[in-house]
């Protein structure tokens, strides 16, 4: 008979004995790992517990007694709760700084930049990909080993209370909100709901006497951070903990930074592979955190200059015919507006914008998509709009091309080749706009 493990200490003992190997997908079993049978909307992973054992997992954590049929299957009240509790317990054993990151835009980019900088001096763990939800954050925390000297944990949310919940799992000592914009408006209940939800990180840090890295020139963030211990960064203000200045020498961000009390003339110019001026503040943030943790300016420069965007986030892709700025991993009204404005300012003779629908806007969807079209009208750039939300507006803004989905757009582009163009491709992940690359 299987034993019902109610003690988190006992489960943690097995976790350590497994070499900290966790599995939640029987398609990717790892020998000796612990399989957690998580439930989803259309599946019950308890059904795969025995297969997980047969494929090499040492134990399977189940929450249905019907599947607890051996010494290697351990019964708990709820497998997801057990995973989250295990992560909390593991976090309590870690004696290293943990930096928590959230925000409407740029979470993953900031996480990767900060990881690149800190890794110049420390063995730093950072969230893999975008494992930033109620499952991903526990898995990230459980991936931090005794060899790591610090950790950077990304937290995402689409409703109020979620960031607070995740903070109580990863328990950050320091934190960063990249910005607060129009993302997940449907789940948060509007812009004020987004502000309240994202600022839960600040409230957690304030309560637990943590430190906040904050863009000192963002009035919304500064207002929310009031009463907290802040380390500010920003443009051209030497009173900040770290300040900088950007230069429009190319399509890629170039900047200098200096700590409080130093002049920018004393610093070296950093030439990055980051497209879009909106990334300047992200780069400056990474320099600020590096400076706080005593990473040398030379090492910061090395890290930021060698970082290359990937995973369809502000990637610059040279095809056989065109230069494509591929930013198709995600989109919301704030990030799309920033991308359009930045692209419109680029000094390129032939420019084309391909935009896909923005998801999770609920009742705000029609208005926010129309706002994007109004912005496009002011830029006078050639544009192609993809997705049902944009398509609904084709008669009102008829100076652009419209397609109901990416496949229809792909067929059109295949028959209407562009050559020597700069093309911005941006939309929500579900639009699958990265598939257009092969015809651009």
Image: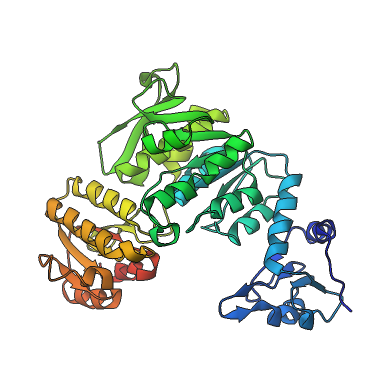
- Can residue 299 be seen by looking at this rendering? no
Q: Is residue 263 left or right of residue 87?
A: left
Depth check: give the residue in front, 278 or 310: 278
Q: Is residue 160 left or right of residue 378?
A: right
Q: Is residue 416 left or right of residue 236?
A: left
Q: Is residue 16 above or below residue 151?
A: below
Q: Quadrant of the C terminus?
A: bottom left
Q: Residue at x 56, y 80 (%)?
A: 42
Q: Residue at x 52, y 58 (%)?
A: 129
Q: Which coloring applies here?
A: rainbow
Q: Is residue 138 left or right of residue 372?
A: right
- Can residue 327 be seen by looking at this rendering? yes
To which quarter of the image does residue 45 belong?
bottom right
Q: Quadrant of the N terminus?
A: bottom right
To which quarter of the image does residue 377 belong?
bottom left
Task: Residue 323: give x, y in percent of width and height.
Answer: 25, 57
Q: Residue at x 73, y 63 (%)?
A: 82
Task: Residue 226: give x, y in percent of width and height.
Answer: 48, 31
Depth check: give the residue in front, 16 or 40: 40
Task: Residue 192: give x, y in percent of width and height.
Answer: 40, 49
Q: Residue at x 29, y 73 (%)?
A: 406
Q: Residue furthest top?
A: 261
Task: Residue 95: give x, y in percent of width and height.
Answer: 73, 39
Q: Is residue 182 above or below residue 203?
A: below
Number of labels in the image equals 0
Depth check: give the residue in front, 255 or 210: 210
């Amino acid at each position: 008979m299987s034993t019902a493990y109610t003690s988190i200490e006992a489960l943690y003992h097995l976790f350590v004995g497994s070499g900290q190997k966790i599995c939640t997908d029987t398609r990717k079993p790892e020998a000796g790992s612990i399989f957690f049978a998580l439930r989803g909307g259309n599946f019950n992973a308890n059904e795969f517990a025995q297969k997980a054992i047969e494929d090499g997992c040492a134990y399977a954590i189940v929450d249905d007694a019907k599947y607890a049929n051996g010494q290697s299957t351990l019964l708990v009240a709820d497998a997801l709760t057990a995973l989250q509790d295990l992560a909390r317990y593991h976090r309590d054993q870690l004696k290293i700084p943990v930096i928590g990151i959230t925000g409407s835009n740029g979470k993953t980019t900031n996480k990767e930049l900060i990881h690149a900088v800190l890794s110049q001096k420390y063995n730093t763990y950072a969230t893999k990909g975008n494992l930033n939800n109620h499952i991903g954050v526990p898995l990230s925390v459980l991936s931090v080993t005794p060899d790591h000297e610090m950790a950077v944990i990304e937290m995402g949310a689409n409703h109020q209370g979620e960031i607070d919940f995740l903070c109580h799992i990863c328990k950050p000592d320091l934190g960063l909100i990249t910005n607060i914009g129009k993302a997940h408006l449907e789940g948060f209940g509007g812009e004020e709901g987004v502000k309240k939800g994202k600022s839960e990180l600040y409230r957690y840090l304030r309560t637990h006497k943590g430190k906040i890295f904050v863009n000192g020139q963002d009035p919304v963030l500064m207002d929310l951070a009031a009463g907290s211990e802040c380390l500010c960064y920003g443009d051209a203000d030497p009173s900040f903990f770290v300040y900088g200045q950007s230069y429009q020498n190319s399509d890629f961000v170039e900047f200098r930074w200096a700590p409080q009390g130093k002049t920018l003339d004393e610093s070296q110019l950093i030439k990055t592979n980051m497209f879009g001026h909106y990334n300047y503040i992200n780069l400056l943030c990474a320099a600020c955190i590096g400076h706080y943790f005593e990473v040398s300016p030379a090492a910061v420069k090395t890290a930021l200059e060698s970082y290359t965007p990937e995973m369809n986030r502000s990637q610059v892709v040279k095809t056989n015919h065109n230069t494509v700025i591929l930013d198709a991993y995600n989109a919301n009204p704030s990030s799309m507006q920033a991308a359009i404005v930045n692209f419109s300012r680029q000094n390129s003779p032939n420019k084309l914008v391909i935009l896909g629908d923005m998801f999770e806007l609920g009742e705000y969807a029609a208005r926010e998509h129309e706002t994007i079209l109004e912005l496009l009208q002011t830029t006078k750039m050639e544009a192609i709009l993809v997705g049902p939300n944009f398509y609904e507006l084709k008669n009102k803004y008829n100076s652009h091309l419209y397609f109901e989905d990416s496949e229809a757009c792909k067929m059109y582009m295949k028959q209407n080749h562009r050559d020597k163009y700069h093309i911005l491709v941006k939309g929500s992940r579900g639009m699958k706009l990265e598939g257009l690359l092969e015809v651009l």
